[in-house]
Image (spheres, grey):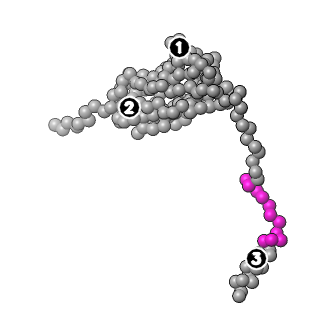
Amino acid sequence: MRIASVLLLWGAICASAPIALSSSLMPLAPVEAQTEATRPSRAPQLLEATTTNNRVRSRYAQYRITLASPADAQPIEAIQIQQRSGTEAIQLRLDQTRVWVNGAAWAIASHSGNGHTEPLILTFADPIPPNSAIVLQLRPHYNPRWGGEYSYGITVLMAEDFSLYLGPARLRFYEGDRRIWFP
């Protein structure tokens, strides 16, 4: 009987107390929907990722990432590259990063980040126009010490702060003979 009276008293106190909502429980402002004018009709595509040398510890490798921008896409203002998988961080030579658009060198206005602990963002002097074949050339200080698959996440940044993740650019590195010879 005592529990029932305590619960009855607690219900009366809760019913008469004013309820205050915290700001985190308040409804959010409506999100503005994308319209046909702000959304690209077709997205750029990640075609392939290759390396000129897939042996571990090689100092003379280049990584090439190929993208295609369709004719009805928005111009690309920047490309973000970040290592997403692999047993070790690959350090890139940022001063030797190159971009080609339809076979011609394209000017990089600035770059920020390093590609492994923070995203490498390549901002272009002029936006890359639609209907373009884009090749990114990255130079590592050296290939990783351990073989396996390493992937870089590729994101394109377009006009009006619109970004689109294209997927992982995968590179595979192979170990040679790791036998240890004892005298």
In whole angstroms, how far apart are the C-alphas of marks 2 and 1? 26 Å
Left or right: 72 in relation to 68: right
- Image quarter hosting the C terminus: top left
Q: Looking at numbered disc 3 in the image, what kind of residue is underneath it?
A: Trp
* Closest to the observer, 49 or 83: 49
In the displayed orientation, state which residue is furthest to the left.
183
Residue depicted at x 56% and y 25% = 44
* Closest to the observer, 44 or 56: 44
Q: Main secondary structure of the magenta part?
A: loop
Residue depicted at x 48% and y 33% = 168
Residue bearing mark 3: 10
**Residue 50 in the image: x percent, y percent?**
41, 25
Q: Looking at numbered disc 2 in the image, what kind of residue is underneath it?
A: Arg
Looking at marks 3 and 1 on the same chain, the residue that comes earlier in the sequence is marked by 3
Residue bearing mark 1: 102
- Image quarter hosting the N terminus: bottom right
In whole angstroms, how far apart are the C-alphas of marks 3 and 2? 65 Å
Looking at marks 3 and 2 on the same chain, the residue that comes earlier in the sequence is marked by 3
Residue bearing mark 2: 172
Q: Looking at numbered disc 1 in the image, what kind of residue is underneath it?
A: Asn
**Residue 133 in the image: x percent, y percent?**
52, 18
Residue depicted at x 72% and y 37% = 33
Magenta includes 111? no
SS class of the residue under badge 2?
A: strand
* Closest to the observer, 46 or 177: 46
Q: What stretch is highlighted in magenta?
A: 14-25
Residue depicted at x 80% and y 71% = 15
The number of numbered discs placed on residues in the rendered structure image is 3
**Residue 155 in the image: x percent, y percent?**
56, 31
SS class of the residue under badge 1?
A: loop
Q: Do the residues labelled 3 and 2 touch (CB within 8 Å)?
A: no
